[in-house]
Image: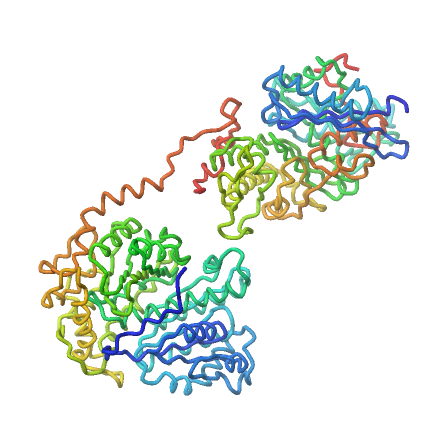
Amino acid sequence: MASNDLMVGLEIGTSKICVVVGESRTDGTTKILGVGQAPSRGVRKGEIVDFETAMQCVAEAVADAEQKSDLMIKSVYVGVGGAHIQSFNNRGSVLLPDDRDEIDEQDVEDAKISAREVSIPAQNAFLHCIIQHYHVDGQDGVLNPLGMLGQKLEADYHIIHGVRTRIQNTIRCVKELPLEVEDVVFTALASAQVVLSQQQKNLGALVIDMGGGTTDYILYVDGAVKQSGAIGIGGDHITNDISMGLRIPMARAEKLKTDEGSVTLGNCLPGETVVLKDDSGFAGKEIERETLNTIIHLRVRETFELLKKQLDEENFINYIGEGIFITGGCSLLPGIDHLAEDIFEIPARVAHAQTMSGLTSAFQNPQFATAIGLIKYAQAVQVERPQRRGLSRLISKFLPGIR
Amino acid sequence: MIQLNRNYTLPEREEDIIPIKVIGVGGAGSNVLDRVVLDGMDKSDLIAANTDVQSLASSVASAKVQLGRSITRGLGTGGDPELGFAAAEESANEVREALSDARLVFICAGLGGGTGSGAAPMVAQIAREMGALVIAFATLPFTFEGKRRSSQAQEALARLQGITDAVVCFENDRMGDLAAPKAGIHQAFALADMTVSQSVRSIVNLIQRPGIMRVGFDDLLAALRGGGGRCLFGYGESDTDNRAHEALDQALRNPLMDRGRMLEQATRVLVQVSGGPAMTLSEVEILMRELNRHISDETQLLFGTAVDGRMGNRLSVTLISSLRREDAPAATPPVRRPMETHVAPAAPQPPAEPSPQPLLAILPEQSAALEPAAQENPAVSAKTKELLPLEENSPEAAPVQQNEPEQAPAAQAAPEIEPTPAPEPVARPEPVARIIPPKKKPPLAPDYTGPKVLPHPQPEKGSREKVARQETLQFEPVTRGRFEKSEPTIVEGQDLDVPTFLRKNVRVK
């Protein structure tokens, strides 16, 4: 097994840190060799707020993964998220010199640079620059312009950017362990790699990654990323709401949410209660199930409505042919797919990783979608098939000398 | 919960029985009727009317009318209200025959289907044409039965409201709450039927039971007037030491009451407290004081109390009110007119018993009770008299004075209350006291030495109300819990870290 076939995805989530060790196989599939995780501390809403603690947690998770996969982890692909991540679409264009009409790699690169020549806030850095489509002399929908004849090359890019220092914090956290950072990837983009097949991307799909601290989303139409972003609301907010609404400690609220919570209203019998056990296992407080569900429902509904508002700023949501895929820890809440269907009026389902082999328990859990997605992303980058659009390699300005 | 199989028949001396007929229209109506029969109501004729012969045959009602003999040929209407209407039209004569002599007609129907939605308004019309007072008990379908059904039901409800004197509307959705969470579906439906049946019976009892402070049609209609939205109905009884509290608690716990929360929005609430001879004034006082916490200052109380020897040790409370639906405020006029015309002839029988006090004064004042401006007695009485000639149109019209005996048993019942200071017979004909104008002592009853129930709660009401209000308010500081120290997520001016239910003012727990 050549070592460069080994890939490690690391996601520093708000509720926990996941490390997935995978192996790329010659037939294009990925085998998961081990999964390590550790509860996350020092992370709020997808961003590191306590550097030391977060670093410790990452070290724990990595050690866990090393132990389980029996491999030494040297370099990782890191997922970054947080509400600071923003995106937009831009078009770059290049005019070929008069004496040449065959488009070469340099022209494509120039088009990308020209697309990036937009003003983003000073403190922000480019995270991804994902090609959507090329246009050659006005001809639309060109997938690969290399070798084509034309005078004018235009390229539509989806550009994802975030606050530079926050991204650097994540990188530093990993580098101090010390581990090498192969690449940083927007979490929703990583999740989409594992949740969506190429065909689903072509038909148009929306991936909602509702994690502990943030809700990230990415929208594909015609096989290309059209919209992406993040909202700083996640499962922690639900837990917090429950804790405050029912006046129970956070840990209890979290357990209550995962064990008994549902977003479906009016589905429980009137007066049905959940008995909250105290530490000694004796029956403690009784909680009305409908109350619990109402709290969860309101929060999730609001988050989705907020998301819809963001998506409605552009028209792409109407071109979704495949549907909505919900992943991340919150997708485990029963009924969340129906609520999404209700709000977006598009078929929705809870998705987990596909086309994987190895530890089934790992990829069937939507909580691992991002970490596994990082491996898929890495796989695509390492193979470096240029036709795999949407997976541009990232060696950003803020990361000189990493590779 | 509420025991339904108890049968409060009136004392034998009750001679002024109003001829009441209860007609169940359609499948749901027949079911309710069956329930009324099973629960026992011996003072009225029960008639089942349906298009479906099979269902009709299985009904236990004493009289049956098959609707649309040739139109539906003994089958149902298949959910088509027009067919139901046509069927009722065809069988109009039979219906008329069945309802003959009735002074008061209760129509039970489940709206949403064919027969109930289509035939019930027709039956109501027939009853009205015959000069009877018509009250409809309509059940609205469950939401899960579909929008089509509920729109049919709304349409039928609107028609019924136009024709009948009052519609008591039951929402199946809310009655579903009646059943214990794990009860079978048949039990849930049976309980829904029982609720309707219970209210039919308690309304009949309410009207016919002699009272120290009687509750009449007028009060009932006043309470239901302007409804068309939700009917609030609660009934509770208890025989324990703390029976006043428990009975009220039970009544408020009725799902149609929504734990008394809805009462606050009601403009008029009819309350009848009845009990055995041992019922004390202080019990009624406690009960009313407690009830006052659930109603707003502006609410008009239509209060009645009755002593019934058969109640034994028990004390029962009946609460009836209706909420005005925002979109249907015009339901009032059609209801008001007949109320005054029909109260009068309700008791055609001459007094056969020694009725100590023919209370002449009652009638006009009762009518007055219906008027929103209850204080303007002279004007209202005049109006009532004006309206009386209308009555002569109906064949059974009876002179006004014949109504008096209806009041007689009140006087009889009164001496039975031992702990209560015996009401002065002279004082009794002041039924205006039943209307409690908020924060005012009943001005017309200075010599009311009888149950001093009403004036007592009044002065305290304001302060008590405030206390109650405070309990319901959520004084919760806006906190962000564990996100207290993190960067706030602010979207459109809202701090999303604050729980959604707090920002949206949704009450939990």
Q: Is residue A126 above or below residue B399?
A: above
Residue B216 vertical position relative to residue B60 in the rendered view, above or below: above
- How many numbered marks appear? 0
On the question of residue A128 being in view, the answer is no
Q: Position of residue A265 (x, y in %)?
A: 54, 48
Q: Residue at coordinates 70% horizontally, 20% vertically from top-left?
A: A60
Residue B119: quarter of image: bottom left
Residue B102, quarter of picture: bottom left
Q: Quadrant of the C terminus of chain A?
A: top right
* Rendered position, B289 above or below B417: above
In the image, taking residue A169 as reference, residue B247 lies left or right, namely left
Residue B415 lies left or right of residue A302; in this view the side is left
Question: Could you tell me residue A65's position as x and y percent?
Answer: 76, 24
What's the residue at 64%, 22% (across, down)? A119
Q: As rendered, which of A55 and B226 lies closer to the eye?
A: A55
Q: Position of residue B33 (x, y in %)?
A: 43, 74
Asked if one can make out residue A391 in the rendered structure from this viewpoint, the answer is yes
Residue A358 locus on image (x, y percent): 82, 34
Q: Nearer the viewer, residue B499 or B203?
A: B203
In the foreground, A159 or A235: A235
Residue at (65% x, 39% y) in the render: A331
- Position of the N terminus of chain A, as image quadrant, is top right
Q: How is the image coloured?
A: rainbow
* In-image side of A194 versus B483 (left or right): right
